Image: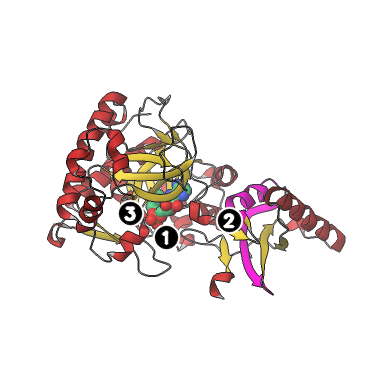
């Protein structure tokens, strides 16, 4: 499969590291001059741009996190005046003010290059008809992928999220070959299609580019078999640019990071110490070429493992493993640490459980209460009460053996859990409301 930009994507690692160092030095100088927040932090720790002599010196720089970006709302972290910013996007901001990010003309160009790489690595080419089912708006997903796909020369259908019947109609009438969406939306689309009698095996749809939220291997397999496509994963976050940070190639063995534009580190989430490739930790990203909204050592909260070995596809860019969980996803229930992905892994191994569930945490009589609502196949619902109870007990037992905690298991019928056209919500923590 052709590589979009072999000059950079297949660069010798020594040359890549030299390029990264030059770009890191430029970025540090750039933010020191232009963003008071970074200058003050660097001054406080006695670090000057000239102290960055080696890539390892990145650890001299301060971490940046969401709080800093919130505190400087809306434009306080911009390194360019607004008249040089051609676009803004923002994070969803479900709690408090959103984070606003800005792009210069050059940044949009880089972003387009990087999403083109992601799409090409997944297998999109000229001649493809691409259904864009991400939201167009403040969310970076829609516009970010849109430009990259256009740059490749594929034909984009800018349908946006929602209106599932229309997506399905166009798929059949236009002969769509590629779907771009969140994995949850892909499943929803498959389900709606099934109900409407769509035969996906007879459609030209062959490839999916999924991102914006975690997708377990089970969910990926489900999407692939229902839609009759190959599903690929791509990752990104608004604070760094949006989609385009990393994406899977045809080898499906990790997501290649755009290392010529981004410096990726994995750190111990507790201590902040850098970890070597092969060890799981929190992904931290420093942008190397961004002009309007550069970030130094941004703590993504996403857990991953880096692999710097050469990939069979020919790319030398390091790969990150699929992101399954975030450090701030962790729920503490009756003193026990629980990651939603642990629950998901248990559920998805059980025959008859559908890939839709909701974790509800509540506080009853001062005690945390964990309920797992799961959608099950029609045939699990039985007239014989004892069979249903046995199924529930079996699920609760399996969960307990992994979590060390008893959960109340509620079985609901297919379609009962709310579907989303964007990212799905898997956890409802009612303790926050108390
Ligand atoms: O979700 C950017 C994006 C859009 C990436 C479309 C890929 C495709 P935010 O809304 O800022 O940006 O959310 C970023 O979503 O820190 C991860 O926790 C999660 N996330 C994004 N992509 C993946 C993925 C966009 N492929 C946050 N796997 C990130 C797992 C993902 N988690």
Residue 95 in the image: state x and y as whole percent: 42, 68
Q: Is residue 143 left or right of residue 203?
A: left
Q: Earlier in the sequence, mark 2 or mark 3?
A: 2
* Nearer-the-camera pick, 291 or 63: 63
Does the residue tagged 3 have its C-beta within 8 Å of any atom of ligand 1?
yes
Q: Earlier in the sequence, mark 1 or mark 2?
A: 1
**Looking at the rendered structure, which numbered label has been put on residue 191?**
2
Q: Is residue 315 left or right of residue 54?
A: right
**Image position of 262 with respect to 37: above or below:** above
Is the Cβ of the residue at disc 1 closer than 8 Å to that at disc 2?
A: no
Circle 2 sits in a helix, a strand or a loop, which is it?
helix
Which residue occupies 22% across, 43% down?
Answer: 289
Q: Earlier in the sequence, mark 3 or mark 1?
A: 1
**Image position of 158 with respect to 284: above or below:** below
Q: Quadrant of the C terminus?
A: bottom right
Disc 1: which residue: 161
**Looking at the rendered structure, which numbered label has been put on residue 239?**
3
Q: How is the image coloured?
A: secondary structure
Residue 193 in the image: state x and y as whole percent: 55, 55
User: Label 2 neighbourhood size at 10 Å, few (<14), some (14-19), many (20+)?
Assistant: some
Of discs 2 and 3, which sits in the foreground? 3
Which residue occupies 76% across, 56% down?
Answer: 380
């Amino acid at each position: 499969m052709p590589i979009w930009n072999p000059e950079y994507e297949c660069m010798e690692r020594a040359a890549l590291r030299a390029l990264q160092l030059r770009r890191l030095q430029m970025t540090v100088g750039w933010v020191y001059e232009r963003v008071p927040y970074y200058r003050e932090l660097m001054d406080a720790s006695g670090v000057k741009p000239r102290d960055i002599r080696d890539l390892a010196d990145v650890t001299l720089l301060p971490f940046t996190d969401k709080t800093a970006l919130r505190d400087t709302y809306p434009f306080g972290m911009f390194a360019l005046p607004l008249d040089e910013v051609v676009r803004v996007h923002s994070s969803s901001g479900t709690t408090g003010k959103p984070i606003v990010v800005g792009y210069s003309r050059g940044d949009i160009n880089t972003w387009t290059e990087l999403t083109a790489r992601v799409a090409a690595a997944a297998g999109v080419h000229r001649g493809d008809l691409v259904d864009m089912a991400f939201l167009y708006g403040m969310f970076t997903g829609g516009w970010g992928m849109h430009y990259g796909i256009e740059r490749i020369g594929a034909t984009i259908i800018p349908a946006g999220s929602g209106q599932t019947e229309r997506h399905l109609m166009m798929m059949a009438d236009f002969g769509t070959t590629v779907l771009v969406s969140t994995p949850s939306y892909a499943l929803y689309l498959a389900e709606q299609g099934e109900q409407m009698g769509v035969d996906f095996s007879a459609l030209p749809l062959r490839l999916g580019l999924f991102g914006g939220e975690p997708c377990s291997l089970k969910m990926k397999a489900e999407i692939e078999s229902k839609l009759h496509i190959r599903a690929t994963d791509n990752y990104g976050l608004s604070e760094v640019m949006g989609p385009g940070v990393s994406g899977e190639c045809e080898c499906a063995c990790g997501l290649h990071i755009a290392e010529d534009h981004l410096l990726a580190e994995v750190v111990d989430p507790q201590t902040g110490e850098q970890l070597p490739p092969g060890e799981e930790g929190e992904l931290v990203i420093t942008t190397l070429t961004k002009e309007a909204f550069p970030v130094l050592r941004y703590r993504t909260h996403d857990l991953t493992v880096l692999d710097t070995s050469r990939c069979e596809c020919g790319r030398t860019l390091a790969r990150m493993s699929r992101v399954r969980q975030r450090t701030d996803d962790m729920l503490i229930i009756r003193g026990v640490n629980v990651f939603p992905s642990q629950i998901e892994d248990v559920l998805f191994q059980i025959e008859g459980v559908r890939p839709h569930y909701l974790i509800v945490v509540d506080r009853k009589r001062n005690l945390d209460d964990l309920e797992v609502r799961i959608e099950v196949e029609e045939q699990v619902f039985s007239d014989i009460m004892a069979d249903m109870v046995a199924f529930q007990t079996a699920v609760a037992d399996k969960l307990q053996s992994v979590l060390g905690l008893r959960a109340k298991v509620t079985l609901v019928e297919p379609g009962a859990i709310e579907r989303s056209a964007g990212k799905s919500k898997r956890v409802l923590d009612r303790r926050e409301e108390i």
